[in-house]
Amino acid sequence: MKGFRDVLPPESLKREKVIETIKKYFKLYGFLPVETPTIESDELLKNDGEEDEAVADRYRLKDKAGRDLGLRYEFTVQLSRLFSEYKNIKLPFRRYQIGYVFRDEPVRAERYREFIQCDADIIGDASISADAECLALANDIIKELNIKAEIIVNNRKLIDSILEKLEIKDKKQVLREIDKLDKISEDEVRKNLLKLIDKKGIDNLFELLKKDLNYFVKNNFGGASEIKELIDICSLYGIKPKFSSSLVRGFSYYTGNVFEVFSKEQKFSIASGGRYDKKVGRYAGREIPAVGISFGTIVDYPKVESDSTKAIVISIGKDKEALKFLQELRKNSISSLMLNKLTKALEYANSYSIPYVIFVGEKEVKSRKFKLRDMKSGKEQNLAKEKLIKLLQKQ
């Protein structure tokens, strides 16, 4: 069905490696897993945010009782329900969630109507240090996956302050157009803005958007000091975020620092997030500060090398001995399987990019040395079981 897909090896192996890496760092940074239903009430999902594209594109349905329901289009919207229903959650609460979300939007390259999001959020911590933790987390993940990317930061208070200084009235629509600057040219954005602002106003807007952070700090623009503090804290992690006053982020609920991680190779966003201090406590009757980051398209990043099965044990008339060898490999955490037809086994290894095959025949059993073939180079060597296992553990 259009917008939905099946995922088979080797793509499924790559996705699994990315998700496992993300989950590893979520846990390393002290985030705890949370699960929520795929279906929610439509009243919760729309959340007074109908102007947001993702909210407008939500899947809507009814149950047999005629109740208005929908498929979740992100995880953050469900946090307001959680903190209303579970009032004893200890703050600050560091939660992560990985799963499918759904949006009934036009299908385009690298974007489907069903896709995986991997979210990490810090609830109940208003400090900029929490924002920096999200960026440090992202930085560790992209380094582990060997992805060349840059972290872009801005602040929604700064954008609002710029629009207020220029006395621009239709803020939401103007922000929507500015948010397209990473997708279309400046000339196209200027043309779109002519429907909302006169040419002089557009020139003034772009003149301000091209100012550096020091200008905004010096002239006391809202949010500028928060961006500077975030960049200063990130330097303690060895991270150098890039400031861009035109970074908006699509959701209207962001209240402070916002950030995006852009791939330098693929030219698209692989993670994004920001601070949303007025959303989580909406139904709990109090303001609860919150900041988070979400990894989406990174799951399908094309240049990540997958972890396949490491070895095939090929039995040549020695099934009993081969099975015993297979068990030894697995006890030593070497992913492996056994086949007993030579040609098919080699074809199988090539099809699924399995790097090694081990031959177990009469000659190998007698000599207690087993032939190991590197499927990429074709190199073969005869090794005692212990040496062979140690070699594979290093690979």
Image (spheres, rainbow, N blue to C red):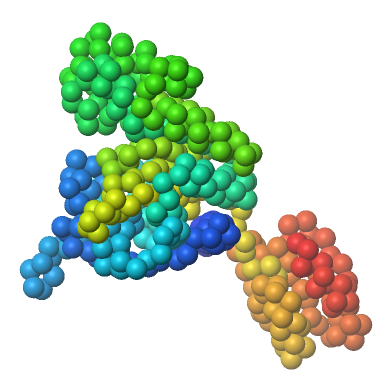
Asked whether, in this view, residue 89 is left or right of residue 357, the answer is left
Residue 38 in view of the camera: no
Q: Nearer the viewer, residue 153 or 37?
A: 153
Q: Position of residue 324 (x, y in %)?
A: 75, 87
Quadrant holding the C terminus: bottom right
Asked whether, in this view, residue 374 is left or right of residue 201, the answer is right
Q: Where 84 falls versus 209 (above or below)?
A: below
Residue that appears at 27% across and 22% down: 163
Identify the image quadrant of residue 70.
bottom left
Q: Where 26 falls versus 175 (above or below)?
A: below
Residue that appears at 87% across and 72% down: 387
Q: Position of residue 319 (x, y in %)?
A: 72, 88
Identify the image quadrant of residue 173.
top left
Residue that appears at 30% across and 62% down: 83
Residue 336 in view of the camera: yes
Quadrant holding the N terminus: bottom left
Residue that appears at 40% across and 43% down: 274
Q: Nearer the viewer, residue 240 or 340?
A: 240
Instruction: Give the residue at the far right of this rendering.
Output: 367
Q: Position of residue 128 (x, y in %)?
A: 47, 41
Identify the image quadrant of residue 331.
bottom right
